[in-house]
Image (spheres, grey):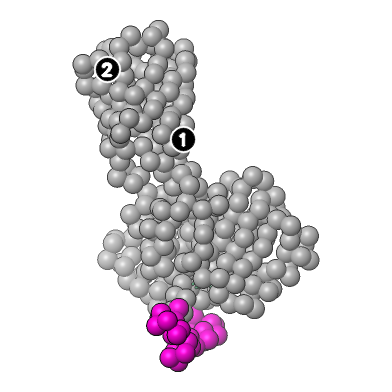
Amino acid sequence: MNFRHIPAYQRTIVVACITSIFTLTALAQTPAAPATPTTPAAATSKGTPAAAAPVNAGPYVPSPETAVAELLKLANIGPNDVVIDLGSGDGRIVLTAAKVYGARGFGVEIQENLVKLSNEAAKKEGLAERVKFINQDLFKTDISSATVLTMYLLPDTVNMLSPKLQKELKPGTRILSHDYPLAGWQEEMYRQFDLEEKVQISGVKTTIVYLYIVPARVGGQWNARVSNTVLKESLRLELRQEFQKISGIARIGAREVPLEELKLRGTELTFRIPVERSRSLNFRGEVNGVNIEGMVELSGARTPWSAALVK
Ligand SMILES: C[S@@+](CC[C@H](N)C(=O)[O-])C[C@H]1O[C@@H](n2cnc3c(N)ncnc32)[C@H](O)[C@@H]1O
């Protein structure tokens, strides 16, 4: 059964059911959070309100090992990756990323016993130099060092995190979400498979892992430089961007030409400019802040090009 092909209203019901089962599981499995001190003294003598208890972003339900393996495979993890798991449970995602792929990283978790367990496992497996687990609220965690961010959290929480992900993660960072999509984001890929263990967790066997890539910021006007063997006139790109969606035109001298097949995948920008009836310039470039560098292909010949952001 492909979840995506279920009509929207049925999907809503499925998600609602999953949410309530997940929440009931939470009540059954998660020890009650320690009560936040609410005495006047705890509210501090300066009158600052006491810190609110962390939002419970999801009960402790470990991802089945098969789901962990699929998730890490989808992320194409390597030894240069920094993996952060938000709500790390017993640490299995970060530990497996380090053990199997040689990655580094950390997990944050509000349940102290799970943090202890994860750090002990890291030590036992000789991974403590590369991974660690911190007893910390995921909403207050600096995630900017991630190259891969993973989460298995309640659907509402996943969406609550969206602004934080957009603000803090570097372009090109891979985000993997187990079972719940990020509303408004276009996934790069997803994998769907059945797992018996999931029946106890969510009432259905269906498991989905989603991969998203944080897009570079490309909206604005860019002055491009290309070899004059490719284009004799000046070239300016005008790009409009709404998060992952982009559109734009090229100004070639005084002419305005729509950009074709414009795509942004993390920091990789590709587009085509038709120059003559049957000839097109095929651009590929790597966005690095206010600069783009790459290669342009015309009739099989490739030459470098670059662009600088004007405004
Ligand atoms: C569904 S489990 C996922 C565990 C692990 N990531 C995995 O996939 O196996 C969600 C975890 O998030 C933790 N959690 C919930 N709210 C949190 C918060 N505000 N900050 C940090 N951890 C949190 C829970 O204690 C739980 O262990």
**Mark 2 Cα within 10 Å, few/some/many (few <14, many 20+)?**
some
Q: Is mark 1 within 8 Å of ligand 1?
A: no
Which comes sooner in the sequence, label 2 or label 1?
A: 2
Residue 220 shown left or right of residue 59 in the figure: left
Q: Which residue is mark 2?
A: 252
Residue 244 shown left or right of residue 153 in the figure: left
- Magenta highlight on residue 41: yes
Determine whether 50 is above or below 153 in the image.
below
Q: Residue at x 45, y 53 (%)?
A: 168
Q: Residue at x 37, y 49 (%)?
A: 186
> Which quadrant of the figure has residue 247?
top left
- Quarter of the figure with the C terminus: top left
Foreground: 138 or 97? Answer: 138
In the image, what residue type sits under mark 2? Ile
Q: Percent position (x, y) of residue 202? A: 47, 73
Residue 108 shown left or right of residue 16 in the figure: right
Q: Which residues are magenta?
A: 25-51
Q: Residue at x 30, y 41 (%)?
A: 241
Q: Residue at x 46, y 67 (%)?
A: 139
Closer to the eye: label 2 or 1: 1
In the image, what residue type sits under mark 1? Asn
Q: Secondary structure at mark 2?
A: strand
Q: Percent position (x, y) of residue 14? A: 36, 70
**Mark 1 Cα within 10 Å, few/some/many (few <14, many 20+)?**
some
Q: Which residue is mark 1?
A: 288
